[in-house]
Image: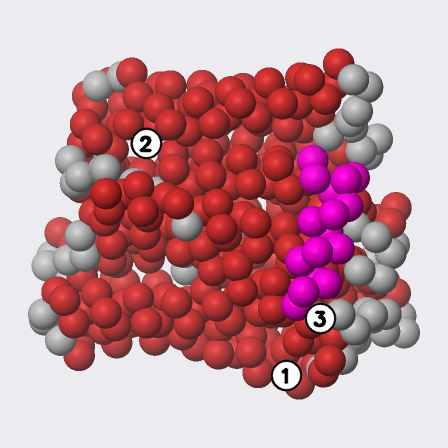
Amino acid sequence: MNYKKEYKKYLTSSVLDTANNRIASASFISAFAIYLGLSDLALGIYAVLDTMTNVIQVFAAPLFSKIGQSKKVVLINYSIYRISSVSMAFIPFLSNNISVRTVLFFVLATIYAITGEMGYITFVNWRMTLIRKDDRTTFAAKRNFLKNTVVLVFSLIMGVVLDKFTIYGYELFGFMILFAIVFIIAFIDISIRIKTYKPVVIQEKISVKNNISIPAKDKNFRSVLITGGLNRFAYGVGTMYLNVFLLRYLNIGYLYYSILNILINLSEALSSKYWGNKSKKRNWSKIILPMCVVFVIVFTMLLLFNNQQLQYLLPLIYILIGFGNASYEMYDHIAIYETAKDKLQTSYVTFERFIEGLVTMIIPVLSYTIFKENNNVIKITFAISILCYIILFIYYKLKESKGES
């Protein structure tokens, strides 16, 4: 095996994968869902669906420990994952009924989310097994920079295209171009993965019961679970209605919406190296505490300023969101894996995602029982997010005072 050559393949496929996830996820897919006529509640649930389906990852480790993380099985699953997202493009041609469109949308979105979760852990495990420990922060920083650059260019093009097509009454054709690009990127990505070396993964066979109990009983891992759970809940609550808020209540155009997505990705790309350097000593307080401050500022601005003021403040808000996202990505891709016991990394990563999914499931329940579809109540979600990030900040301050990283 040529390490440098395979490193480049893993980097390229990881960039294409994460870039496609950004393109075919919350931002433009939410805009497409609004075009389809889905309700605010449906859009809010979709915004956290990806994290909710993390619960199935607890079954992924036992499954792949039995089948040996077969490259063929993993690639078939990954192909279904990508095809399901592109298939959303056919919904407008199948029915004009909003209820039917909503059902079709969520069937495809759920398949997309589940197959994504099932395949996620294997690709992470292969990548982390292949890449040397000293190269991991550099790899993460390079990947974040490159994938955000790809999304930046794409967002600008699509914003102009969607606005132009919408002006002339052909909004749907703009979205079709979007899905075509997603398909092309996915095709290239899958082609590269087929030719990429699969490292030998030493994975002890483990039952579903042990997959839950071993990480749950590990005291050293509890901090990771608390951090991941609190962050996912806080971020999920705060952002679940953000796209709806912008497009439906602030009525911003597609071009402005695209510029905001460019800013968030540009911010992530430029700050990735900074957070990568901060991560080298594995002092995670230096990552999580600033992240909490950033998101408290973000959601405070969204909560306190009126709609007219927010029109001008959105660029700053999105730059800060990108900065905060980049910090947590470093923790997410390194701390979780390296805190796990040797040979049980798959179990630990999937269990952490399982906890994130359970916590996030609370959000749609809150939406259905408490939140109603209007601007003022959406702002309540920002207040809840602020409170959660303050709690996470206090937790890490207490850890820091005890001499824990």
Per the rendering, the mark at residue 381 is: 2
Between disc 1 and disc 3, the foreground one is 3
Residue 50, by quadrant, is bottom left
At horizontal 79% and vertical 24% (from top left) the residue drawn is 404
Q: Earlier in the sequence, mark 1 or mark 2?
A: 1
Q: Residue flagged by tag 1: what amino acid is it?
A: Val
Report the residue marked by disc 3: 207
Name the side, left or right, on which 228 lies relative to 4. left
Which amino acid type corresponds to the residue marked 3 in the rendered image? Ser
Question: Magenta segment range?
Answer: 208-223
- Callout 2, which amino acid? Thr
> What secondary structure is found at the residue carrying circle 3?
loop
**Distance between the alpha carbons at the discs numbered 1 and 2:** 40 Å
Which residue is located at x 57 percent, y 26 percent?
A: 392
Q: Residue 229, percent across and down?
A: 55, 41
Color scheme of the displayed model: secondary structure
Mark 2 residue element: helix
